Structure formats: structure tokens, C-alpha cells
Amino acid sequence: DQQVKQNSPSLSVQEGRISILNCDYTNSMFDYFLWYKKYPAEGPTFLISISSIKDKNEDGRFTVFLNKSAKHLSLHIVPSQPGDSAVYFCAASATTGGFKTIFGAGTRLFVKA
Amino acid sequence: SQTIHQWPATLVQPVGSPLSLECTVEGTSNPNLYWYRQAAGRGLQLLFYSVGIGQISSEVPQNLSASRPQDRQFILSSKKLLLSDSGFYLCAWRPQGAGSPLHFGNGTRLTVT
């Protein structure tokens, strides 16, 4: 049972354009959502998060949007840079149950120069 | 500042041999601790999490076990490795309380031959 889904395995974007990565979730108890970036053979690094009481959070080039009614969130990167090429994981957690964080399968982003 | 150490970085073990991976966190107390596995081309699967010493929650029935003998130490073990145990193992921590992201170690690449 995949509670967090990233349906696009990969995404290719031209440098300078916007990258939009999507994520859907099924568990209504999730109240904290995160995006991580991962390079091969390294641990994921935290990018940005959003609480369920908000619908948008922005940090520099990265913006996360949350649509609770649709159980959907997205990460916008603008402008995209070649260094952004990596695997991006969407994750979600609930305040109850030890704050276990459930990850999606990831989307590999390629930013072409 | 807080740091997380995970070792070894790589490990090649024969089928049927035991396993012990260790993770320690510095600079914080009473963290929540987590073990994840990333199989080849897959997302991050939560294996175990712990909210305190001696408290372990298992997410997936399998050939592995976890222990937390000290507040900031988390150990992943197996008595007899299977080929299917191969993967990239990640330890992570987060502070107690809501609204904090997970912080990951650099991971251990385990190959069972």
C-alpha cells in the first residue's frame, strides 16, 4: 500500500526553466510534508517542508504547494540549474505514531544545460 | 551542531553471514531514530523506528532486527543474510516533537553475495 506516490520516474528540463515535481498521498492523517534531494551513494538531504495548515512555502528557488483536498503536493524549482539534477523524494509524516516518515519512490530530475 | 555517523560505508557479505550496522547521533538527546533501505532503483522503505531506548517499532516483517542500546545509538542486525537483503541502508534522526525533518547519514551499501 503506497501511501505516498510519485508517478513520474523521471523529468527532463532545460536550464533556466521551471521544474515541477508532483506527489500524491492517501493517508488523511499526514500533516507534515517534505521534499528531499538525493545524489547517488549519499543520504538524502532535506530541501523544504510544509505543514498542513499552510498551502505554500517558499525558500529561494524552491516552492512547495499543498492541496489538501486533492491530497497533492508539488515542488517548483525556478530557475532550474544543472546542479539540481538528482533524485527528488516526496515524504509525509503524521504527528501521531512516532512521526514515522513515509517516502515516495522518487523522481529523477535532469536539468540540461 | 548535530551530526549523524553511520558505518561502514560499504560492505560485502556472503549469504548466511551475520550483519551489524551502527549509527550514532551527536549533539542532541532523546532523538527519534530510523532505519531505511533503498533497494536498487526503488524508493526509501522504512524498516524500523525508535522513540526511546529499548523501544523499537518494526514496519516490515523481514530478516532484520534493530536495537537501541543507548540514547543516541541505533543498530541494525541480521543473524543470517539473504541475497534480498542487498541494498543501500540509511540511518536517520529527528528531534522529538512535531514539524521537524529527518536528517540522514551517508548510508551503507550492502551487497550480499
Image (cartoon, grey):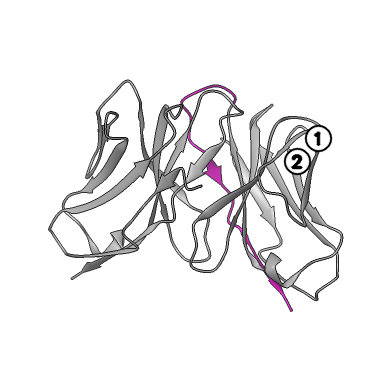
Closer to us: A68 or B50: A68
Percent x, y for residue A4?
A: 43, 45
Do the numbered discs 1 and 2 sit on residues whose CB atoms are within 8 Å?
yes
Figure quadrant of residue A57? top left
Q: Where the C terminus of chain A falls, by quadrant?
A: bottom left
Tell me if residue B110 is in the magenta stretch: yes
User: In the picture shown, does residue A66 fall above or below B39?
Assistant: above
Q: What secondary structure is the magenta-colored segment mainly?
A: loop
Dot 1: element: strand
Tell me if residue B108 is in the magenta stretch: yes
Closer to us: B39 or B99: B39
Percent x, y for residue B41?
A: 48, 67
> Circle 2 sits on which residue?
B73
Which residue type carries mark 2? Gln
Which residue type carries mark 1? Gln
Figure quadrant of residue A59? top left
Name the residue: 81% across, 32% down.
Answer: B54
Magenta-colored span: B96-113
Percent x, y for residue B103?
A: 53, 42
> Circle 1 sits on which residue?
B70
Closer to us: B22 or A2: A2
